[in-house]
Image: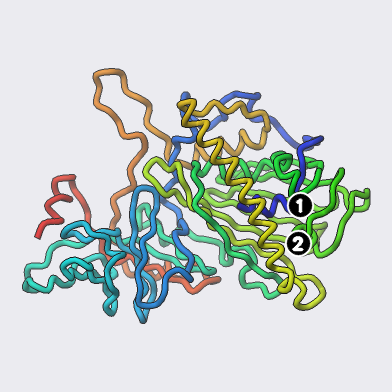
Amino acid sequence: MDQSLQSELSAQAAGMSHEAADCPASPGEQPSGMKPGTDLRRVHCDPNFWYPVAWSRELKSGKTIGVRYAEHPIALVRPEEGPVFALEDRCAHRQVPLSKGRVCGQSVQCCYHGWAYGRSGRCIDVPYLGKGKLPNGVRTYPVLEQDGLIFVFPGDPEKAATTHLPAVLARVEDPGYKTRRFGKVVGCHYSFMHENLMDMNHQFMHMKQMGQMRPRFLGQKREAGMVEARYSFARTSGKQPLGEALIFGERRDASAKFADRDVMTIRTVYPYQTLHIQTGDADPVMDLWIAYTPQDGEQLTNRTFGLLSVKRPGIPGLLDLAWPFLVAFTERIFAEDREIVELEQQAWRDLGGDHNLEVFPVINLLRSLLAECGVQPEPEKPAGEPAVAASAPLETPKPVTASAAATAGGASPGGDVVRKTGRTRRRKSKADATSDQKV
């Protein structure tokens, strides 16, 4: 989505300078870090990170909503008092979604028979049973609320306390910036989104919105868990769109005065992406933070969550007045990006796998990073041997100690933080899990 941003300053892929670009792979060669024969579009996200699942504004006080991480439905609950908590979205009785229930104090009550669950996931009341006969409960997830987003930690809850987000995402708390929150469900694997944002040569596609721009590749960087690409741009023809003018705070033409003046830096810091644009040592004119949360078991659909902060110009109130024009501009860019990545996903389906011939070195670095950091599928077994799951399952949640939960709650000082894990049951086997659900 930040693609919209990109588009704003972006350009058509005419000429490219590969300064400081050391090639990690030849065109079409599988990037390092990927097991032989691995299809990147089958690599799942590592669940041991914080993933946004909803906007804070979506969850009203005293209400519950249903969200997803991959194949896992999750009920978010906001009591009238106290922080948000998250449970698997099913009643242990008849598997009815708890997100259809009602909030009662610090618990949620199933809409079917009134079974109630506290923030620890324990079943705390069955109206027609004695207190000594309560069944086991449901899984609970660590929760973090920051900068207008609600995050869950779908992996090992013991790792939640030591896995942190930046103190502030984009420039949400900076009064010198105005921030737009955006995002939609996109029908593609998250890796297509990472590639789309990092490869500014795709601005050729945005020619109608942006005019013709020449991108210049300034270099790349690869560190543990991170890939970075840097670009500058020069307009070769066409009029500057209003949305871009709002971002830069000035009108620009195709003269040499404005060519290659600003630097756009794009990073994938797994599993998130950032993009910012600045001139020299000045504050960025735009700062973007974006994440892609899988929405199905195969992780071929994602929900995009983006925070786009634009620097306020010197004239007070100007950006607020013109904000609808910037929103419309970025929406048009995102619509084009969404269409193209969904076409890529459809081609993957039609061809039965990833046949991409990648020639841009930094994208091969990115593909390598996503493969290394993600959960790669197990190699296929010879005929006659037992089948192996396509990807590693999420780790069974373990209880988090009170001290660990407290540490998690203070990990991100930039937001109104909530991390509550409570007790979570351990499943020893599928048979135990089934019996746990019986009264």
Say which label, 1 or 2, has the lower sequence index: 1
Whole-percent x and y of residue 402? 32, 69
Q: Report which residue position mark 1 lands on.
A: 9
Amino acid marked by disc 1: Leu
Badge 2 marks a residue whose secondary structure is helix
**In-front residue for pair 80/166:** 80
Whole-percent x and y of residue 194? 58, 44
The residue sitting at 46% across, 45% down in the picture is 301
**Residue 403 in view here:** no
Q: Which quadrant of the view contains residue 133?
A: bottom left
Whole-percent x and y of residue 141? 34, 61
Mark 1 and mark 2 residues within 8 Å of each other at the beta carbon: yes
Amino acid marked by disc 2: Ile
Q: Residues within 10 Å of mark 1 (few under 14, many from 20)?
A: many
Residue 249 lies, with reference to residue 20, above or below; the image says: below
**In-front residue for pair 251/238:** 238
Q: Report which residue position mark 2 lands on.
A: 247
Residue 384 lies, with reference to residue 427, above or below; the image says: above
**Residue 315 in view here:** yes
Badge 1 marks a residue whose secondary structure is helix
Q: Residues within 10 Å of mark 2 (few under 14, many from 20)?
A: many
The residue sitting at 22% across, 61% down in the picture is 91
